[in-house]
Amino acid sequence: MSTPVIIFALIGVMVVLVAVAAWLYDARRNKDVAEDDERVEQPRRRN
């Protein structure tokens, strides 16, 4: 394989990994927000 193909493949893999990591982080953060709504006495509102 030529060098541009290897670089393109590496970029594609990195984009997929970042997308999966962001999706997992967002799902975990949404679960934490749902738990916060049940626990009103200690609100955590961090962006």
Image (tube, helix red, strand yellow):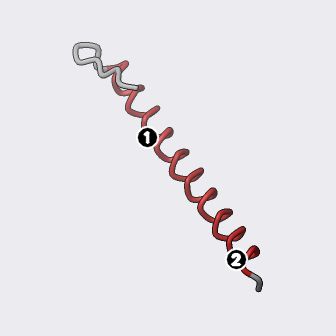
Q: Residue at x 35, y 20 (%)?
A: 45
Q: Residue at x 22, y 13 (%)?
A: 41
Q: Quadrant of residue 35?
A: top left
Name the side, left or right, on which 44 lies relative to 8.
left
Q: CA distance from mark 1 to mark 2?
A: 33 Å
Amino acid tagged 2: Ile
* Circle count: 2
| Mark 1 surroundings: few (<14), some (14-19) or many (≥20) residues within 10 A | few
In this picture, is 9 found above or below 22? below
Q: Residue at x 55, y 45 (%)?
A: 23
Give how far across and how far down residue 38 sits, in percent: 34, 20
Q: Residue at x 28, y 20 (%)?
A: 39
Name the side, left or right, on which 15 lies relative to 5.
left
Give how far across and how far down residue 47 sits, in percent: 40, 26
Tell me the residue that label 2 is attached to.
6
**In this view of the protein, which residue sits in the foreground, 46 or 44?**
46
In the picture, the quarter occupied by the N terminus is: bottom right
Amino acid tagged 1: Arg
Give how far across and how far down residue 20 sits, in percent: 57, 53
Secondary structure under badge 2?
helix
Q: Quadrant of residue 9?
A: bottom right
Q: Nearer the viewer, mark 1 or mark 2?
A: 2
Give how far across and how far down residue 11 sits, in percent: 65, 63
Q: Quadrant of residue 46?
A: top left
Q: Residue furthest top?
A: 41
Of labels 1 and 2, earlier in sequence is 2
Q: Are marks 1 and 2 in contact (CB under 8 Å)?
A: no
| Mark 2 surroundings: few (<14), some (14-19) or many (≥20) residues within 10 A | few
In this picture, is 3 found above or below 45? below
Name the side, left or right, on which 31 lies relative to 6.
left
Which mark, by number, is residue 28?
1
**In this view of the protein, which residue sits in the foreground, 8 or 21?**
8
